[in-house]
Image (cartoon, coloured by chain):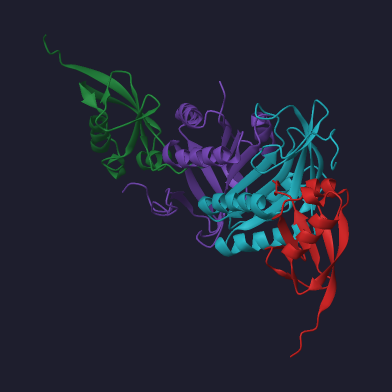
Chain colours: A red, B green, C purple, D cyan
Amino acid sequence: MQFTPSSGTIRVRFFARYAELVGRSEAAVLVSLPATVGDVVRRVRAELPGGRDIPERPLAAVNLKHAKLEASVRDGDEVALLPPIAGG
Amino acid sequence: MQFTPSSGTIRVRFFARYAELVGRSEAAVLVSLPATVGDVVRRVRAELPGGRDIPERPLAAVNLKHAKLEASVRDGDEVALLPPIAGG
Amino acid sequence: MRTYLTRDPLSIGELVAEVASPQCGGTCVFLGTVRDGPEEHGVRAIEYSAYEEMVEGEFGRLVTDARSRWPAARIAVRHRLGRIAAGEASIAIVTAAPHRAEAFEACRYVIEEVKRRVPVWKKELRTDGTEVWVDPSGRPTVRPPDRPTHV
Amino acid sequence: MRTYLTRDPLSIGELVAEVASPQCGGTCVFLGTVRDGPEEHGVRAIEYSAYEEMVEGEFGRLVTDARSRWPAARIAVRHRLGRIAAGEASIAIVTAAPHRAEAFEACRYVIEEVKRRVPVWKKELRTDGTEVWVDPSGRPTVRPPDRPTHV
């Protein structure tokens, strides 16, 4: 089997304080595949204005479910970066 | 000090199933003093029609507070015989 | 003097309003309702009776005990007496506290203590026409009412 | 599909009616209300926001988990979003079960899990005009909003 380098577009969503930090509620991030949630976070922190203020290891969700930073992402996935939860 | 034998009248109250067993909600019981709640229960069981159906060691209260059968009673006290509590 | 007994339907909203306070972030409510489940034998209603004068004092002591354990808790309790239809509430307890753990614990404490020490009794009025005194474990205590009480 | 979110004031009565059943003798309610106590700094209101699409799914999974632990429990939950004034409820959880222990345990489980995993956030709107994001331990997470967000 041959390894085919490819890239994918991830829809990244920001909430609450994180949305304020980056001044937006979402962004499209292009990553080389295979990639993990952690890779997406690194891109956000490196490239988005204000992104550096988001912690290196935030809570995250992929496609509406909690996910670890080690979870892999695929083209078209929605990754959300979640500030510490404060509901109830 | 001299021991003076005396007697007292105890107002005995019956509730719920016990009131049905003796067919009344209260009775005046004359006891020789000193006496305990247990003595009052024995009199009730021996003398009131239906009294024998009340257990030998029922829950009891003296003057609106839970009391042990060993607690002493005085002239004028109100002793209540309480079926197993089933509130709430 | 506060009265803990009523013959009217219980209003949760009223009790919640009684304990509400800006200091309290957590409120816990317990409602005990007349059940007609598979463990029962067709319960139409329960007739609640009480040693009313003692109930008032016992509730007062119980609430004082709860307040000494959870000093920041605010507590409201009401027990209904008389005939209560299946599905309706016989007791409502509301506790409010700064934090939820205290509210839950105080509420649970109050209902457990009520079951242990407040002199209230219940008689099931069954769909088959019989009436049965219920003991705390939920088992009937006695003979059906159509037999003579004392022979 | 059931919705767990609302922007309207919460109605306990409505939720209690949702779970009521003749099989259930115990009902437990938890209300979380916006607090303005001594630990706070003059809170007028809290602005609640959420990752709404995920909240619906997460609540669904959470309720399913609770039902698998307490199979006889009936559960209703509603979280309010938007601006909620001090003293008003942001969340209401109602659990009904044949016996009270299950109702209490299921109710407590739901609120603990909500705090752990349902993506909702709150910003305190204080009487001094400042607005502060609150973290789960109740401490403000950040700088006052009058400083620039990124330099």
Q: Position of residue C86 (x, y in %)?
A: 60, 51
Left or right: where D97 falls relative to B43: right
Query: Can you see residue D71?
Result: no
Position of the N terminus of chain A by quadrant:
bottom right
Toward the viewer: A3 or D138? A3
Single out the residue that lies furthest toward the bottom.
Answer: A1
State how many labels appear: 0
User: Can you tell which quarter of the image residue B51 is in?
Assistant: top left
Q: Residue furthest top?
A: B1
Q: Residue at x 42, y 54 (%)?
A: C139
Q: Nearer the viewer, residue D60 or C60?
A: D60
The answer to whether residue C70 is seen in the rendering is yes
Q: Could you say where residue C129 lies in the image, as x and y percent from the top left?
A: 53, 55
- Residue C23 position (above or below residue A69): above
Q: Position of residue C115 (x, y in %)?
A: 46, 42
In the image shown, does B54 or D127 lie closer to the viewer?
A: D127
Residue C16 position by quadrant: top right
Front-most of residues A66 and D90: A66
Instruction: Provide residue D19's location: percent of width, then percent of height.
Output: 67, 55
Query: In the displayed structure, does residue B61 sit left or right of residue A25?
Result: left
